[in-house]
Amino acid sequence: MGKYLTAAKNEVKLNFRYRFNLLAFSTGLLFPLLGYVFLWTPAYSEGGRVGEYSLNGLFTYYFWALFLDYTLPVFAYGDMAWNIKSVGLTLFLMRPFSFLLYYGSIIAGGTLVW
């Protein structure tokens, strides 16, 4: 009976760890957004624009930056950096082959499976 209680206890710990990670991730998304709201709303309250930028444009940029950051697999950054450092990028430049489309297709495939 003890081994079943241990298995149940481990499952409870695993579920709480998952829920804590989800809570920490959500909080990590919320705090920067609140920072943007509290810092930039007073700056834009006077005229609605700062230079060429509007508040809606700033939040749109922030949303797309977060979207790309959380949908791109982590391996893509390291792989691209390795290709640049190891001169592997020149192989893509010498062929009629788009480096960006190649990585876009890899990321799309990885995101669909992930």
Image (tube, rainbow, N blue to C red):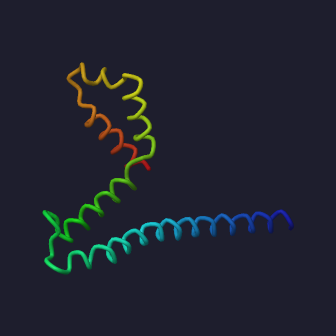
Query: Which image quadrant for residue 11?
Result: bottom right
In the rendering, at what x and y percent does residue 107 appear?
35, 43
Query: Which image quadrant for residue 97?
Result: top left
Q: Which image quarter is the N terminus in?
A: bottom right
In the rendering, at what x and y percent does residue 27 appear?
48, 71
Residue located at (30% from left, 63% from top): 62
Residue located at (15% from left, 76% from top): 48
Vertical relation: 38 (above or below) 90:
below
Q: Residue furthest right?
A: 2
| Left or right: residue 113 compared with residue 40 | right
Residue located at (37% from left, 54% from top): 69
Vertical relation: 55 (above or below) 113:
below
| Left or right: residue 35 compared with residue 15 | left
In the rendering, at what x and y percent does residue 26 appear?
46, 69
| Left or right: residue 12 compared with residue 89 | right
Query: Which image quadrant for residue 108?
Result: top left
Using the image as rendered, state which of residue 45 and residue 31 is in the foreground: 45
Using the image as rendered, state which of residue 38 and residue 94 is in the foreground: 38
Query: How many callouts does the rendering have?
Result: 0
In the rendering, at what x and y percent does residue 82 appear?
43, 30
Vertical relation: 68 (above or below) 47:
above
